[in-house]
Image: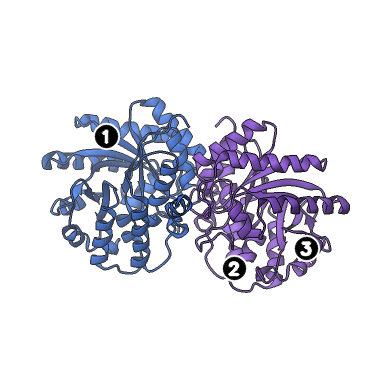
Chain colours: A blue, B purple
Amino acid sequence: MTDLPKRVVIHEEGPREGFQIEPGPIATADKVRFCEALAETGLRDVQCVSFVDARRVPGMADAADVARSIRQRPNVQYSALALNLRGYEQAVKTPLHIAGHLQMSASNTFSIRNTNKDNAETLTEQRRQLAFFRDRGIAVESAIVMTCFGCNFEGAVAPETVRDCVGSLLALADEFGIALDRVRLADTVGWASPAGIQRVVGLVRDTWPDLRLALHLHDTRGTGLANALMGLQMGIDGFDSSCAGLGGCPFAGHKGAAGNICTEDLAFMCAEMGIETGIDLDALIDCARMAEEIVGHTLPGKIMHGGSLSQYRRGAHA
Amino acid sequence: MTDLPKRVVIHEEGPREGFQIEPGPIATADKVRFCEALAETGLRDVQCVSFVDARRVPGMADAADVARSIRQRPNVQYSALALNLRGYEQAVKTPLHIAGHLQMSASNTFSIRNTNKDNAETLTEQRRQLAFFRDRGIAVESAIVMTCFGCNFEGAVAPETVRDCVGSLLALADEFGIALDRVRLADTVGWASPAGIQRVVGLVRDTWPDLRLALHLHDTRGTGLANALMGLQMGIDGFDSSCAGLGGCPFAGHKGAAGNICTEDLAFMCAEMGIETGIDLDALIDCARMAEEIVGHTLPGKIMHGGSLSQYRRGAHA
């Protein structure tokens, strides 16, 4: 495990992932207190809402209210996701951080189902967004490639296709004079295995050795943390994850779509491996339990049910 | 991943793990059809029941009935677990395979809570069992060391303690002229992390380079398959697991005790990594869904909810 990073940066997506997919209505005040609690755990980057079509995603209809109600503490980035110019126009009116990013999907069919745009149209749309970001002074921080490891519509995705997508997004950023902080490789519909991580990350890294990568993993088939482990072993130091394992993709094409890997389970694994996350694990477990209370049903996170080891270590050493 | 085994042997514990802990009564016929279905998936070793004190484990009160009702097919080992002579005496009266094994716990306190015997008494009991096995012609196949990675009562467990336990059991086997096929290292209460696997497996392997090892992992804190991945990377080619993630330890000392790692999720990960298990994944997923139907609630396995990839691969390539 010689390539393990010393420290990983976790981008928390639980509020956005969870509130967009939960079937029942969730009170705005509950969304707000969950975001505020997450920001007390040591997480430095909490994605609170998305600005999307409320007819397609009713759980985000109150996104602007949530955004304005959160009491922001220092040194935490409270961010909003948008997928198109209409969303960005709404987002800039709120006090949330706009995470300007580029995106495309390694599966053209997924792209059409997810955004109503094929890959060529997506690149055209990205140019419009980049012009918008430039005009509004919004920094473009990352690019994300979706369905990097497979797609329910197109099947297996070749690592070379992912590499070409990364290349397209890097060229686009370059065209606008932007140096991307990171490229995020997303297992949007849960096809990744440790072998897939190794192949895709390996090829992208071989092509751009100095490019910082992050993994966005869903735990659809149980290998989420094993995939994260393989990423860590390859030196990946950025992960998107979701407190309590909240979420799932509403457009994945099947009902079994699972949420992101669980933040507190990932934080536990990192801590046990001596990798810093800056997270107070017990505080984060409390947030996960709050999430279960808010949504009113069991969520897939494990350590919130198993309990952290700190209680036993204290007891054993007392 | 150069030390990956070409093939792993999976020891299925779902029926025994699950039926011993489910709170409601489960019909004998359901237990039988579940064992029979598992044996049709390519699994070669199905642990069907345990012979234990029915007052402590009411779900096993019908163990002898289950054992006698299963229609055994060829080339599958239908086994019974026993923990003491009384249990072995009951087991030998059934048509099930008796998995003669040695066991001790790396945590003395866990041993007392689990079996009412401390480590010294456990070794004495093992001698009585070895004499019984010899008299009855029962082969002793493996030894298991429990709580190898930590214990809720004693806290962290030093790898050296595990090594000493393995040494004690190997010496005991040697005393009776037995060459053990495998030593199983168990994360009985879900303390393991990939780093813990690396430390413990590393030390045991350094001490006995030719000893075949297996891992018995519980997914209490979400790292179950990541721990398995680390084991695979160290060449471990034997795993205990549980269809649908059935189970949990009734004596672990806290209610969050989770079941073994999920067999079909493990089999999926192995298949995606090119490691043979001999398992028909879709047939095993059907068994997991049968298990949910039998117990009447959601079980923790992931791929049975997310679905295997074969349907999408077929569709995509059609």
Residue A172 in view (yes/no): yes
Q: Nearer the viewer, mark 2 or mark 1?
A: 2
Label 3 chain ID: B
On the image, numbered disc 3 is attached to which residue?
B86
**A282 or A72: which is nearer to us?**
A282
Which image quarter: residue B80? bottom right
Q: Establish whether labels 2 and 3 are both on one chain.
A: yes
Label 1 chain ID: A
Look at label 2 and name its amino acid: Glu
Sequence order check, earlier mark of 2 and 3: 2
Label 2 chain ID: B
On the image, numbered disc 1 is attached to which residue?
A181
Asked whether, in this view, residue B157 is left or right of residue A177, the answer is right
Secondary element type, mark 1:
loop
Give me the residue at 81% from left, 48% from top: B139
Give me the residue at 63% from left, 55% from top: B111
Using a 10 Å C-alpha cutoff, classify the residue at mark 2 as few (fewer than 14 neighbours), some (14 to 19) or many (20 or more).
some
| Callouts 2 and 3 close, C-beta under 8 Å | no
Look at label 1 and name its amino acid: Asp
Estimate the spatial distance between the alpha carbons at disc 2 and disc 1, rounded to whole Å.
49 Å
* Number of the label disc, if any, that sits on residue A70: none
Measured as percent of width and height from the top left, residue B260 is found at 58, 54
Secondary element type, mark 3:
helix
Q: Nearer the viewer, mark 2 or mark 3?
A: 3
Using a 10 Å C-alpha cutoff, classify the residue at mark 3 as few (fewer than 14 neighbours), some (14 to 19) or many (20 or more).
few
Look at label 3 and name its amino acid: Arg
Q: Establish whether labels 1 and 3 are both on one chain.
A: no
Estimate the spatial distance between the alpha carbons at disc 2 and disc 3, rounded to whole Å.
24 Å
Measured as percent of width and height from the top left, residue A159 is found at 45, 34
On the image, numbered disc 2 is attached to which residue?
B22
